Image (tube, rainbow, N blue to C red):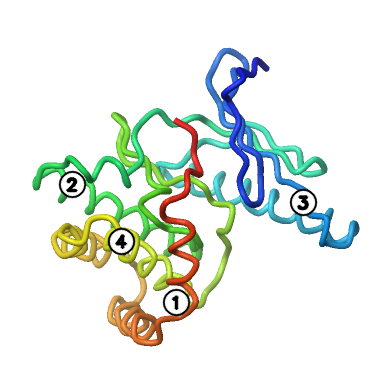
């Protein structure tokens, strides 16, 4: 693997490298040990998170969703090698987007997130900073906080995070974006859409811890372009 001097990014949980692997550009995500965690727990935590992320990526990729293809995983070392997605973060793309394109993007994200939730998978950090606009379509990235759950609150939290991330940067786009998003989500979600909306309103009213976490996550660079 060939690493350049500008090919790594230090995040809260992992170091991200952009490398050449077998002739193709890839993302290497290596989870970091934390000194405040007991060594045994630290090892278990890192391995479990790595295994979980690789499994979820593989499942979603096999199901036809636009996510980075997992190429190699080393559970013991907490390392995951993924396809590199060429493109622009949605958090940047929305600064210059035409109305028709906005609708297409929102519907694509609505469809994909519904299909993800149909598989009982939640993203955990579903913001426009973790969505890449590519010439091949809209890709969802960074499943480090993702998991499996039958609790629809997890799905509603994903949508809440998406809404808040758009509002934080582009408040004037929130209404047209979410109208198209919800139309597609409703078409493809296999559960009760009304229950999702009820839970979403409940979360918004409670103003959970999510908003505090969002302020730290929506603006940080978690994917190297």
Q: Marks 4 and 3: which is nearer the front?
A: 4
Q: Residues within 10 Å of mark 3 (few under 14, many from 20)?
A: some
- Where disc 4 sits, the SS reads helix
Label 4 to label 2, Cα distance in Å?
Answer: 21 Å
Q: Marks 1 and 4: which is nearer the front?
A: 4
What's the residue at 40%, 42% (across, down)? 66
In the rendering, at what x and y percent does residue 170 appear?
23, 56
Front in this rendered view, residue 154 or 128 = 128
For residue 104, the mark is: 2
Cβ atoms at labels 4 and 3 below 8 Å apart: no
Residue at image mark 3: 47
Q: Is residue 133 left or right of residue 38?
A: left
Q: Residue furthest left?
A: 99
Q: Is residue 147 left or right of residue 86?
A: right
Answer with mark 2 or mark 1, whichever residue precedes in sequence.
Answer: 2
Label 3 to label 1, Cα distance in Å?
Answer: 26 Å
Which quadrant would residue 183 be assigned to in this image? bottom left
Front in this rendered view, residue 91 or 142 = 91
On screen, residue 38 above or below 224 = below
Residue at image mark 1: 152
Q: Residues within 10 Å of mark 4 (few under 14, many from 20)?
A: some
Residue at image mark 4: 168
Answer with mark 4 or mark 2, whichever residue precedes in sequence.
Answer: 2
What's the residue at 90%, 59% (across, down)? 40
Q: Residues within 10 Å of mark 2 (few under 14, many from 20)?
A: some
Label 3 to label 2, Cα distance in Å?
Answer: 38 Å
Answer with mark 1 or mark 4, whichever residue precedes in sequence.
Answer: 1
In the rendering, at what x and y percent does residue 32 appear?
74, 46
Cβ atoms at labels 3 and 2 below 8 Å apart: no
Q: Residues within 10 Å of mark 1 (few under 14, many from 20)?
A: some
In the rendering, at what x and y percent does residue 200 appear?
34, 78
Cβ atoms at labels 3 and 1 below 8 Å apart: no
């Amino acid at each position: 693997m060939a690493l350049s001097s500008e090919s790594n990014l230090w995040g809260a949980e992992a170091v991200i490298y952009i490398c050449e692997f077998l002739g193709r550009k890839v993302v290497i995500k290596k989870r970091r040990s934390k000194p405040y965690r007991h060594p045994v727990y630290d090892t278990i935590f890192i391995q479990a998170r790595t295994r979980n992320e690789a499994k979820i990526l593989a499942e979603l990729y096999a199901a036809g969703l636009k996510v980075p293809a997992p190429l190699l995983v080393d559970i013991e070392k907490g390392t995951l090698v993924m396809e590199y997605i060429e493109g622009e973060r949605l958090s940047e793309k929305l600064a210059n987007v035409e109305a028709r394109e906005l609708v297409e993007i929102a519907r694509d994200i609505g469809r994909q997130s519904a299909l993800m939730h149909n598989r009982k998978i939640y993203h955990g950090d579903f913001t426009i900073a973790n969505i890449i606009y590519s010439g091949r379509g809209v890709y969802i990235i960074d499943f480090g906080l993702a998991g499996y759950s039958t609790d629809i609150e997890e799905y509603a939290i994903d949508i809440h995070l998406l809404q808040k991330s758009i509002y934080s940067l582009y408040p004037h786009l929130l209404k047209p974006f979410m109208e198209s998003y919800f139309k597609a989500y409703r078409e493809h979600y296999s559960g009760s859409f009304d229950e999702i909306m009820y839970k979403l309103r409940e979360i918004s009213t409670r103003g959970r811890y999510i908003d505090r976490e969002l302020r730290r996550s929506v603006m940080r660079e978690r994917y190297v372009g």
